[in-house]
Image (tube, coloured by chain):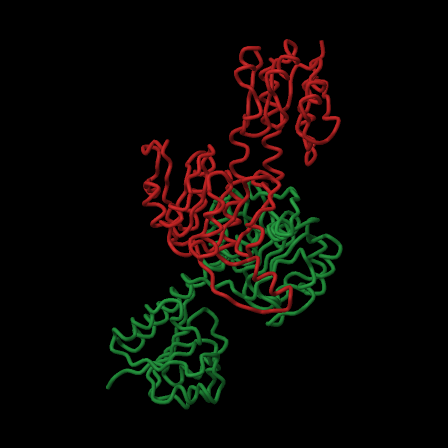
Chain colours: A green, B red
Amino acid sequence: MTLRVAIGPSSFADEDPAPRRLLETAGVEVKENPFKRRLNEAEIIDHLKDVDGLVAGLEPLNRRVLESAAPRLKAVARVGIGMTNVDLEAAQALGIKVSNTPDGPVNAVAELTLAALLALLRRLVPTNAALHAGQWKKSIGAGLMGAKVLLIGYGRIGRRVAVLLRAFGAKVLVYDPYLDRGTLRDEELPVTLEEGLDEAEVISLHASGDTCLLDAHAFEKMRDGVLLLNSARGELVDEQALVQALDSGKVAGVWFDAFWQEPYTGPLTRYEQALLTPHTGTYTRQCRLDMETTAVQNLLRDLGR
Amino acid sequence: MTLRVAIGPSSFADEDPAPRRLLETAGVEVKENPFKRRLNEAEIIDHLKDVDGLVAGLEPLNRRVLESAAPRLKAVARVGIGMTNVDLEAAQALGIKVSNTPDGPVNAVAELTLAALLALLRRLVPTNAALHAGQWKKSIGAGLMGAKVLLIGYGRIGRRVAVLLRAFGAKVLVYDPYLDRGTLRDEELPVTLEEGLDEAEVISLHASGDTCLLDAHAFEKMRDGVLLLNSARGELVDEQALVQALDSGKVAGVWFDAFWQEPYTGPLTRYEQALLTPHTGTYTRQCRLDMETTAVQNLLRDLGR
């Protein structure tokens, strides 16, 4: 019997056909996402009829969906890290193997973090706007050589950011309560959150979870004129406290790629010193291709191909 | 007799008083720039009366000026690399020692180059503008891992850019007719200009001189959708040919920090895909401090202090 695989993500193989070809070369029949957008529960139940595997996006894969697709559905391969849309318990009970692609986003998110930090340090956005408006206004920026950068959260992405920062000569401070200090390099200095907030000129969030780490109290402890970067989750920061810190000048600039609600239309959009991107940390051609390729490989492995 | 030193650059020690203090600690009497802007010939002649040394900016230090200041003027220390404002032959004939600070701008220019490249690759400027205008529009960007970057000119700044690019996993191609190939690392691939233009996804100019290297013919040889970065000199690129290449889509994006005329108000200001900065490659606090400190040290050494 020919293996059939359904595609969840609306943009699968849009930028590069290689991941689809990998399925076809393995003799798999590919069932495309018929709507080219995220499927709702009724649609994904329909989409999963008579398929052996799913290349999964963020469509709801709850117990009802998985039960309706079993027993033929044998494997789900997420393109990405997050698994909050998958009922892992139900999948296990139904004998459905579930995989994700934890390394895929690392470079793309780390590169966007550096892009945003360098842009803030050198005031790229206002300077470019002024020159396009006919104004030649030089202003002094800051460099990364010797700058103290606190990373909050030191998993795959935090570590990659640290490697890049060290290449620029920055001094990397690391706060991560789950940290095994034996895995740190000499140049990576483990600190308490208090120490880190007190010393850092730049703070970058790479933590998971949704506990608020930066509240009004934490902002008070920061250095005047600090830069704050958030590619992780909106919930890690108290939005109101941040707005106050921007108003007071305590925080000189921020970059946010992850928000409290998305699409985001909140107060940060009114601050010129806020650099904002619409959760596009993983949006590079290389990253999409890496994650899609890895997801297909995971799926083929879990289907015994 | 107390040594007297005149200050040329209008912004000397504005960001950090340390370089001025270095002079004062050495017992030197400091004569400030009275106009806080670049001095013309008459003004610098007046400014150099009865001084032993000059911390120099870009004021005209031609034969007339130097002859009027000799024999008391013994040393000129440029804050920066360029010496085109100094008549070196006249200085030598008059026994005036001249120094510059070739390493000062390296990090600042290399960092701004990476800032601009990453911003272009991830479309930071239009994405940020859209979000501030209430539009949540994701678009796919590109990463540096595996990207082919051609560096034209491989002096101090080009080499530092290469180190940073390699940290991001880019493949660095090098074109420099003055290159000693023995000094290249394994990962740095020397190419002819034709080979480089044919292969590169990104081209970054770090050459000196004012010979046009990128004319209409060169643009034809480039890959479609190439990015072009210029932190070196406007004259290296044919402006009209560049505008045509932007119109045709041959060039997908550019960053210019150095222009044909400055202040620049030319056609690039009309292109959204042109990221423009007002010759601020060296405008970081670290860089100004480094260059000013080194210039003062050079001057004190040349005055025998």
Q: Quarter-wise, where is residue B51 in the image?
A: top right
Q: How many marks?
A: 0
Say which of A44 and A236 sits in front. Answer: A44
**Horizontal and vertical percent position of residue A71:** 35, 89
Quadrant in the rendering for residue A138: top right
Q: Quadrant of the N terminus of chain A?
A: bottom left
Please determine whether, in this image, residue B27 is positioned above or below residue A95: above
Task: State whether residue A103 appears in this view.
Answer: no
Q: Nearer the viewer, residue A60 or B62?
A: B62
Residue A240 % position (x, y): 72, 65
Q: Is residue B247 visible?
A: yes
Instruction: Residue B43: name its quadrant.
Output: top right
Of the pair B14 and A188, the residue shown nearer to us: B14
Quadrant of image for the C terminus of chain A? bottom left
Residue B215's spot in the image, x, y percent?
Answer: 42, 43
Residue A298 percent location from the top left of the image: 34, 71
State the residue at coordinates (25%, 84%): A2
Which residue is painted at 58% across and 16% down in the image?
Answer: B302
Q: Is residue B176 positioned above or below B46 on the image?
A: below
Q: Name above or below for residue A297 compared with residue A230.
A: below
